[in-house]
Amino acid sequence: MTQPRRGRRRRTVAIATAASLSVLLSPLLATPATADPTPPTAAVPVIDTAAFADPPSAVRPMFRWWMPLAYTEDSVLREQLDQIAASGAGGVEVAPFIVAGEGNQSNAFLAEYGWGTPAWAHKMEVITEKAAELGLIVDQNLGPHYPPTVPTLNSFNQPEAEQQLVFGWSAHAAGEAVTGALPSPLTAPPSVATKLAEGATSGQTALTVASLGGFAIGDVVTLGAEGTSETVTVTAVGDRLGATGMLTVTPISGDHAVDAPLVNVAETTRLRTVIAQCEAECAPGSEGPAALVPGSIADVTDKVVDGQLDYTFPADGARWVIIDFQQTASGLVGQRGGYTATQPNYVVDHLGRGGVDIQADFWDENILTDAVKANLDKVGGGAIFEDSLELGESQKWTWSFLDQFEERRGYDATEVLPALAGIGIQGSHEAAFEIGEVGEKAREDYRETVSDLFVDEYVTPMQSWAQTHGLDFRVQAYGLPTSTSHASSASGIPEGESLNFGSPNPLGAEQNYRVVSGGAHLAGKDTVSVECCAVFFGGYRSGMAGPNIGGQFSDSGEGSVLGGKYSQGLLDSVYKSYAGGVNQLVWHGFAYPDAPAGVGTAGRDGGTWPGYQPWDIFGALNVNDVFGPRQANWEDMTGVNDALARTQYVLREGQAKLDLGVYYEDLGLKGSSVSGQQAEQHMLGTDSATSSAGYTYDYFAPQFLAEEGLAADADGGLFGDRSAYKAVVLNEQRTISLDGARSLRNLAKQGLRVYVVGQAPSELTGAEPGAEELATVVAELLAQPSVTQLGTEAELPSALSSDSIAPAVSPSDQGSALGFVRRAAEGVTYDFVYNRSGEAVQQSLTLAGTGRPYQLDPWSGEVTPVGEFTQDGDSVTVSVDVAAHDTAIFALVDDDGSAVHAVSSDADVLAPAADGSISVRATGDGTFGTEFSDGSSTTTDVTGLAAPQGLSTWSLAAQTWGPAPDATGMTASKTEKVDQPAIDITADADGKLPSWREVTGEVDLSNASGLGTYSTTVTLPEAWTESDGAYLSLGDVLDTAQVWVNGVQVVVNQADRARIDLGHQLEPGENRIEVRVATTMFNAVKATGDSNYQTAEQQRTGLMGPVTLTPYRDTVAFEAPTATATPQPTGEPQPTSTDGTGTTAPTSAPGNGGSGSGNGDSDAGGQDGDLATTGVDGSLAGFLALLGVALAGTGAAFLIRKRRGRVTSE
C-alpha cells in the first residue's frame, strides 16, 4: 500500500480557535487534568483543531508551475517559492514549457537550457532545496511536455517508441492466382526527411545534412530523388548543435547533388497475412465495412517470402481478400517546437515495459540527482506526474500484443484481426471488415487487452519505479480505452481534471471523478488529486465565486452572471471535484514571471504584460489562469488556500464511506475525450432519483470482484474495511464477465445486497465462451433473497428504503442540489455537503450515527458545537444553510449526550457559550420560542432591533494595475500600480452600484483592473446594544472581497458574500465599513490589444451590490448550571471580553489574505495542542468552557441559519 504523502507543518497561525491546542471532542475527561496531562490514546476520539486551523503541507493546494525550461534565474525560482508558500499552498508541480523567441528552439540553445540537461538538473536542485526549507512538496512532470518522452528516444525505430497496427488489403476473384508484393498499408508508416547540405560522391560515408532530427544509428534510409535513389544504413550521428549535421552511413554507390533528399521511413514488422471470403462484392474504397464469411479466414503468413505472396484462391464463392497486418511506430512526437537538443523525441509505448524502462533510466541518470533525492526526502517525497493520455488517433499496439491477447482473452487473435482493422485509438471506429456477430466481441476484447496492458505493463511498473525513490506516480489514467478505476488503483496518486470532467458530461461533473476515486478508495489510496480549473478563453477572467462552466469552445455558455462567457467559478469547480471524491487540488497554474517574446504571434508566451503566459496560443486563444502576484486577488489567495487546505484535511481523515457501489466495466469516461463505445446509463448522475435521495456512491471496476478471499460483510455490504458499500448496484448493465457474474452470485449467497436496475446482464464481455453458463449464473443471482431487480432507476431509492438501507446523510427536501461525502475516522464521522445548484439551500439533514454534531468552518478555521439538533437513536438531525455553489462540513463526535442543547427554535441558535449557556439570534423583532433537550423551553422577546438598511453611498479609492512604462522584453511583466483619486459612487433605485466598466469621468475605470477600496459610514441608533450585531450582504461582486468594520477585519467566505457576519463590532452612532475588492485582470489585459484576449467581452467588476446591512440580536435563552471550575489553557492569556450574550468580539481574522492573514508566528497561547486544565467536570460543559476560552477574541458566533434569516441580493 502506498504510504501517505508527508509534509512539514507550518508555524501555527494566530487563530484563537485552538491553534494553540488540540481539542479532544470527547465528553469524558473523567480524571481531573494535571499541569502535565496524559496525551490521548488512540481510542479517544479526536478532532485536531490545531491541524484543522493550520493544515500541513501534505493536504494544502498545489500549483502547477510553468517555467521556460532551464532559462530561469535561481534567485527568481527561490522568490517564487516564497510567494507560493506565503499563499498558503503546500507544493508545486514543475511543468517545463518551450522558450519562445528567435533561436530559442535551436539545438544549441536546448543543449544548454533544455529539459533533462545538467542545467535542468541544477534548477531542480535549486527548487527542491528551497522547497525543503519551506516545507513544500515538489512534483515533477514526467517528460519535457506531454505525452511523455525522453531525449534518448529520438528515433521512431527504437523499440520503446509507441507502436500502431496498420493494414493493407486487396480484393480478388474466386480462383484467381496472385503472385507478387502484398498490398501496402492504407496508413503509411511515419517518416522524416532532410536534404544534403553538400553534394556527395560515390563511396562517400560522411554526409552533411540540413538536420539530424529523427535519424539514429541502424536506420535504413533512402538517399536521392526518384530514379537515382539508393538505400544506406546510418552508422553514426554527429553533433546536433550546428546549423548542419554530419550523418555517417554505409558507402554510397552514386553521386548526389546538394538538396538531394534523405528520407527515413519507419520500419515495419509483419504480424499476420490472412485471406478471407467476402459475403458479397467487396473492394478497397467501398463504403462501410466489408462483410466476411465467418470461418473463411485463413492464415497464410508462412507463405509470404520477402514481402511476396504466391497464392491461388479457391474457385468457388464470391470475391476473396488478402489482408496484410503490420506493426510500425505511430510516429507521435512527444513535443514539438523545442524542448530537447535531440528533437524530435517520440512518445513512449504505453502498453509495454520498454516505455517505462527508457524513462526510468533517463530520470535515474539525469534528473534525480543525489541532491534532488535528498531534498525530496526532507519533505517526505513527491510525485512524478503524467497528464491525460492525448495520444493522437492511431490504433495502439505493442510488441507482445498478439501473445498478450491470447494469454488474457484465451484465444488466438489471428482469425479476428480483420474485425480490428482501422478501429482507431479507442477501438470504437467502424472497422474495415465485419465478421458476423464475432466482430464487436473481438473489438471488446481488443479494448480490454489495451486496458490490461496499460495497467499491468505501464502504470504498475511506473509506480514501482517511483516508489524506489520514495515518490508516487501521479497520473490522469484516461484517454485510451482503459478501465480508469482499475488504473487508478494501480497508480500512486490518481488524478482527474475539471476541463474534461465538467459540463460536457450531462450526468454531472462528479461522475468521472467517482470512477477515479472509486478505484483509489478500494486500493487504500490516501490521495485523489485534480487539475483545476482550466477553461479555453478564460485567461485572467476567473472569479472565485460563481458557477462552474463548460471547458470547451462551444460549451462555455454565459459563465457566471458577472464574469460572462468563458469566466470560471473557481471554487465551484474545486467543490465539484471534492464531491466526486477528490481531496488534493492542483491549481492550473502559476507561471515564471517572464520569458522572451514569441516570434510571429502577438503576445506569444513572454515579452508582454502582465508576464509569461505559456497558454497564450496561436495569437488568438488562451487558457486560464495564471495565479501569482500579477493578479490583483493574489493577496487574498492565502485565505482561499487556507480554506481549501482545511477542507482537504477533513477529506483525508479516516476513510471514505459510500452508501452504494456501482459496478462499472466501461472503458473510458463520459465527456473526457475518450471512448463513448459503451452506454452512459451505467452512471447514475447527479439528477438521478438515487442521488436526489441523498445516497452516495462511486464506481468500481470488475477487477475488484476478483480479490482473493472477498466476502460479503455481515450487514449485507461489501468492502467494509474500505468503502463500506451497503449494497451493490448494476445499472442497465448488459454485459459482464463470467467470473464477475460468479463472484456476484457467490457474494449474494453470502447475503450481499444487489440491486439490478433494468436489464440484467445477458451477454459476456468480449468473445469469452460460456453464454449458457452465464444465463444460469445470472438466474441464480437474481433468485437470491438479497437481490432485487427493478424496472428503472427511479425505483431504487424506495427499494433501498424498504430494505432499511438509508443514506448516511438524508436531506429533508430531496433533489439534485446537494451532494455529500462521508469520511469516518476513529470516533469522528465527517460529512461534507456541497450545493451544486445556483440557489441557496436551507433544510434539515439527518446524519447517520450518534454523538454531538459540530460544524467546521474552513474560512475561519473554527470548530464549533452545533447549537440546535435532535437525536433519534442512531441518527442526528441538523439544519443546514448553504449558499449556491458553496459547502458545509459537519462532524459527529462520540458523546454521552449529557450537555443541554436546543432541539427546536423559532430563531437561529448559537453555539453554547463557554459557561454552557445557549443564546438565540433574531434578525427582527418578535417572540421566539425555543425547546431544549432537557425538556425545558423558553420564550424570547426581541424589541427595538434596528431595521435593515441598504448602503447606497460609497467612496471608491481605486488602485489601477497596468503595464509599467519601461516594461519591455524580459521585464514586460512589470506592473505599475496607480492610486487614483477617491470618487463618490451612488447606487441606483434598485440598490445597484456601477461596475468599473461604468465608471468613466475624472477617474476612468472602464478598461481598468486592480484593487478598489469602498468605504461608507453606517449610523446606528443609540439604542444599539452590545448584544446587537449585523450581517452584511455585498450583492454582486467580482472578484474577491475583504471587509473591515471600524478598522477590524472580519472573515469572508469568498463563495458566499451574501451573509458576512460582522459580529459585535458595530457601535451606536457612526461606524465605518470598508470593502476591498480585487478585480480580475482581464479588462486591463484586453486593453493592451493582445490578440489572445480579444474574443471575450470585458467583464463587469468591482462592488456592484445591492449592499445591505441586516442587524441581529443575540439573547441568552438557556442558563447553564455553574461549572465546578473554569479550565484555563496554558500559554499566553486569552482575550476574554464578551458582549454579555455568550458570543465574543471579533478581531483580525485569519486566513483572509492582507492584514491579519497568512502563517503568522504567534502561537495564540499554549503549545500546539497541549492542554493544562484543572477541575474539569467530566461533562461536555467542561470542554465547552475550554473551547470558549480558546475562541475568545475571534468573533466566533456559530449558528444554524434558518430560512427567514438569510440576506440575499435582489
Image: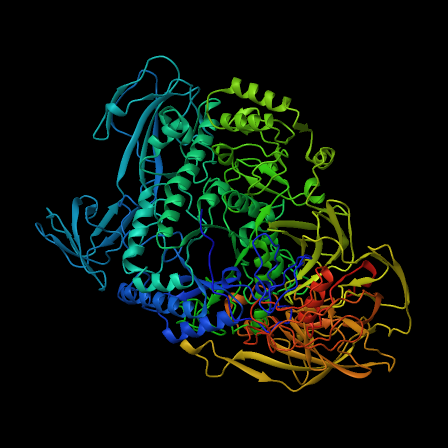
Query: x, y (%) of residue 434?
Result: 45, 26
Question: As rendered, which of 478 and 54 lies closer to the eye?
Answer: 54
Residue drawn at (64%, 44%) of the image: 696
Residue 552 in view in this figure:
no
Quarter where residue 417 is shown = top left
Question: As rendered, which of 916 and 274 lies closer to the eye?
Answer: 916
Quarter where residue 1101 is shown = bottom right
Q: Residue furthest top?
A: 316
Vertical comparison of 735 with 970: above or below: above
Vertical comparison of 80 with 520: above or below: below
Question: As rendered, which of 679 and 523 lies closer to the eye?
Answer: 523
Question: As rendered, which of 128 and 1160 lies closer to the eye?
Answer: 1160
Looking at the rendered image, the quarter that the C terminus falls into is bottom right
Query: x, y (%) of residue 705?
Result: 51, 33
Residue drawn at (72%, 43%) of the image: 693
Query: x, y (%) of residue 743?
Result: 53, 28
Query: x, y (%) of residue 506?
Result: 63, 45
Is 739 positioned to the left or the right of 320 in the image?
right
Q: Specify the color scheme.
A: rainbow
Is 1008 positioned to the left or the right of 467 in the image?
right
Quarter where residue 1052 is shown = bottom right
Counting labels gives 0
Is 742 positioned to the left or the right of 469 in the image?
right
